[in-house]
Image: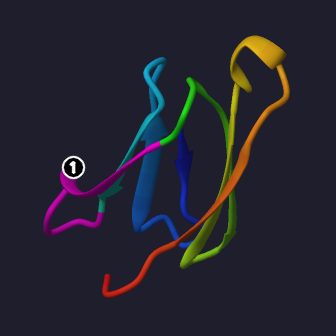
Amino acid sequence: MAFSPEGRFLITGDYYGRIFLWLVDELECGRLISNYVTSDQIKAFHWYDETHVIVADAGGPSFCPHLYLLKLEGI
């Protein structure tokens, strides 16, 4: 999991490749606002800026991780 640079969002991932974006501001703490599914379990997140997240998965049987650039729009 990783908090956004300004601390407004939290991104989490799981063994099944699911990514969840949570709003964690003071008014609506812990509200799920978006999700995304990758091809393998999530290994790492990096917030590029407040609206872009780089995600790495485990890479499956080849152990060659896939990288995803997620752009958060309309939030």
Q: Hey, which quadrant is residue 12 in on the image? A: top left
Nearer to us in this view, 3 or 53: 53
* Whole-percent x, y for residue 27 in the image: 14, 69
Q: Look at the picture and state if 38 lies above or below 74.
A: above
In the rendered view, does 44 fall on the left or right side of 17? right
Q: Which of the image's four quarters has the C terminus?
A: bottom left
Nearer to us in this view, 40 or 42: 40
Q: Hey, which quadrant is residue 40 in on the image? A: top right
* Whole-percent x, y for residue 39 in the image: 54, 33
In the rendered view, does 38 fall on the left or right side of 46? left
29 part of magenta stretch: yes
Near mark 1 (Cα within 10 A), the count class, few <14, some 14-19 or many ≥20, is some
Q: Is mark 1 on a helix, strand or loop?
A: loop
Q: Look at the picture and state if 74 lies above or below 2.
A: below
Nearer to us in this view, 18 or 30: 18
The residue singled out by tag 1 in the image is 30
In the rendered view, does 1 fall on the left or right side of 37? right
Residue that appears at 47% across and 34% down: 13
Residue that appears at 85% across and 28% down: 64
Q: What residue type is labelled 1?
A: Gly
2 part of magenta stretch: no
Q: Look at the picture and state if 63 lies above or below 57.
A: above
The residue range painted magenta reads 25-37
Q: Residue furthest bottom?
A: 74
Residue that appears at 30% across and 58% down: 24
Nearer to us in this view, 41 or 30: 41
Specify how the rendered protein is coloured: rainbow
* Whole-percent x, y for residue 21 in the image: 36, 54
Q: Residue furthest top?
A: 61
